Image: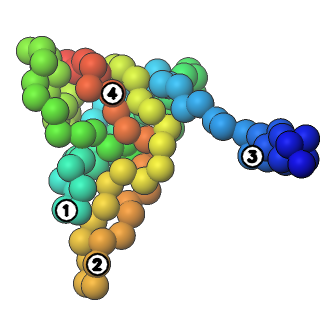
Amino acid sequence: MKRSILSLVFLAAIAFPAYSHAQVPFGGLDVFEIPCTCSPFTFHVFTPLYVASPIPITGALAASYTPNLWMYYILHPGAWALGYFVPAAEACWMYAVAGCFPLPTLGTISPFTGTSP
């Protein structure tokens, strides 16, 4: 009995592995932002957005409401940002008609992201 339970746990670990979501470097120009109405985040659109590659894309990231740690931390439209983000599930939820719905993002920005003035 003990052997069968142990083998089931082993097979479940192989079938459903745990994934680690490491931080990914990014850099880009913040061109648009709106506050998320159902979650404590701000929706930022970056273009060009360099995500661990020299090839630019356009994408959206969510930034949490954190206190300003450094002078050039304030992320605003027109500022170039350089830092890390965590690829994650939908962080920005917006209120619409009958409830809250997710607004797609690539991930959540780390609080240690630097910006230009």
Cα distance between the residues tagged 2 and 1: 11 Å
Residue sitting at x 32%, y 44%: 62
Mark 1 crowdedness (10 Å alpha carbons): few <14, some 14-19, many ≥20 = some
Provide the residue designation for mark 3. 16
Residue 23 coordinates in the image, percent (x, y): 48, 25
Amino acid carrying label 4: it is: Ser
Of pointers 4 and 1, the one earlier in the residue sequence: 1
Provide the residue designation for mark 4. 110
Q: Is residue 58 visible?
A: no
The circle on residue 37 is 1
Q: Identify the image quadrant of residue 54.
A: top right
Q: Is residue 77 left or right of residue 21?
A: left
Q: Tell me the SS state at disc 3.
A: loop
Of pointers 2 and 1, the one earlier in the residue sequence: 1
Residue 102 coordinates in the image, percent (x, y): 38, 63
Residue 65 coordinates in the image, percent (x, y): 17, 39
Q: Tell me the SS state at disc 4.
A: loop
Q: How many labels sit on residues?
A: 4
Q: Is residue 38 visible?
A: yes
Mark 2 crowdedness (10 Å alpha carbons): few <14, some 14-19, many ≥20 = few
Q: Is residue 87 left or right of residue 72?
A: right
Do the CB atoms of the residues marked 3 and 4 lie less than 8 Å apart? Answer: no
Do the CB atoms of the residues marked 1 and 3 lie less than 8 Å apart? Answer: no
Q: Nearer the viewer, residue 81 or 5?
A: 5
Provide the residue designation for mark 2. 99
Residue 42 coordinates in the image, percent (x, y): 23, 47
Amino acid carrying label 2: it is: Gly
Cα distance between the residues tagged 2 and 4: 28 Å
Do the CB atoms of the residues marked 2 and 4 lie less than 8 Å apart? Answer: no
